[in-house]
Amino acid sequence: EISVESVDGGGVAVVLLVTGRGVYGIPVPLAGLPAIALALLVACAAFSCLAFAFTLAVRKAGAAVPLGTGITLTLYFLSGNFFLVEHPPLALRILGDRFPIKPLNNALLTPHNPNTHETRHEWVELLIITAWSIRGLIPAHRSFDCTRTAPPRRNDNETAQNNLDTQHGSTDPDHRTR
């Protein structure tokens, strides 16, 4: 089953490619489109798996957005998304290369490079992104149980009547106060 987020992400990618070509005249090598599509599919799967794992770490819904934003911005800075550092320190380079953002950047930028003549797929980068999807999937798979079902819901009138009964001290389900 294809998620709405995957369709939205693919739609945004198409709009960006068309806008870049139509408005700004950026060449889009047609030979690189399969590599771009593959990188987007691998990235959608990886970040979905990481999102499942992230839900295990965050205990309160109100903390999810600030934590997610802080982690994302940190990874963007480590990966060099916002600015290019000519000679980053070794530790910064290693961290940026091992997290999934920089490999995704490389996997999406290489197909646009007109100097790339052979394959336009960045297989090592895609393997790094896939490894991150497995890292996210394993704890999520261990923690989520899709076989459990929710208990049957009682209708609202019955629930309200039971609340009234317990307020008036009756535990007998046949005893109704009106």
Image: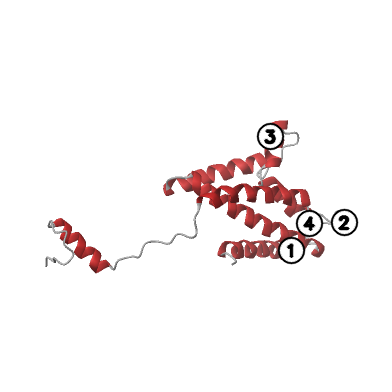
Q: Are marks 1 and 4 in contact (CB under 8 Å)?
A: no
- Asked which quadrant contains residue 16, the reply is bottom right
- Tell me whether the residue at label 4 lies in contact with that at label 2, contact meaning CB atoms closer than 8 angstroms: no
Structural distance between the alpha carbons of marks 3 and 4? 25 Å
Q: Nearer the viewer, mark 2 or mark 1?
A: 2
Q: CA distance from mark 4 to mark 2?
A: 10 Å
Disc 1 versus disc 4: nearer the observer: 4
Q: CA distance from mark 1 to mark 4?
A: 15 Å
> Looking at the picture, how far across and down is residue 159, in whole percent?
24, 64
Residue 118: numbered disc: 2
Q: Secondary structure at mark 3?
A: helix
Amino acid type of disc 3?
A: Leu
From mark 3 to mark 2, how far is it between C-alphas? 30 Å
Numbered disc 4: secondary structure:
helix
Among the 4 quarters of the image, the one containing residue 18: bottom right
Residue tagged by mark 1? 21
Query: How far apart are the alpha carbons under marks 3 and 1?
Result: 34 Å
In this rendering, the answer to whether 73 lies above or below 147 is above
Disc 2 marks a residue whose amino acid type is Glu
What label does residue 43 carry, if any?
Answer: none
Q: At label 4, which amino acid type do we have?
A: Pro
Label 2 SS: loop
Estimate how packed mark 3 is, as few (under 14), some (14 to 19) or many (20 or more) residues with alpha carbons within 10 Å: some
Q: CA distance from mark 2 to mark 1?
A: 23 Å
Numbered mark located on residue 92 in the image: 3
**Looking at the rendered structure, which numbered label has been put on residue 111?**
4
- Work out whether mark 4 precedes mark 2 in sequence or the reverse, and give the earlier one: 4
**Which residue sits at x=65%, y=47%?**
132
Q: Nearer the viewer, residue 23 or 174?
A: 174
Q: Is residue 151 left or right of 54 when viewed as pictured?
A: left
Query: Is residue 91 placed above or below 40 in the rendered structure?
Result: above
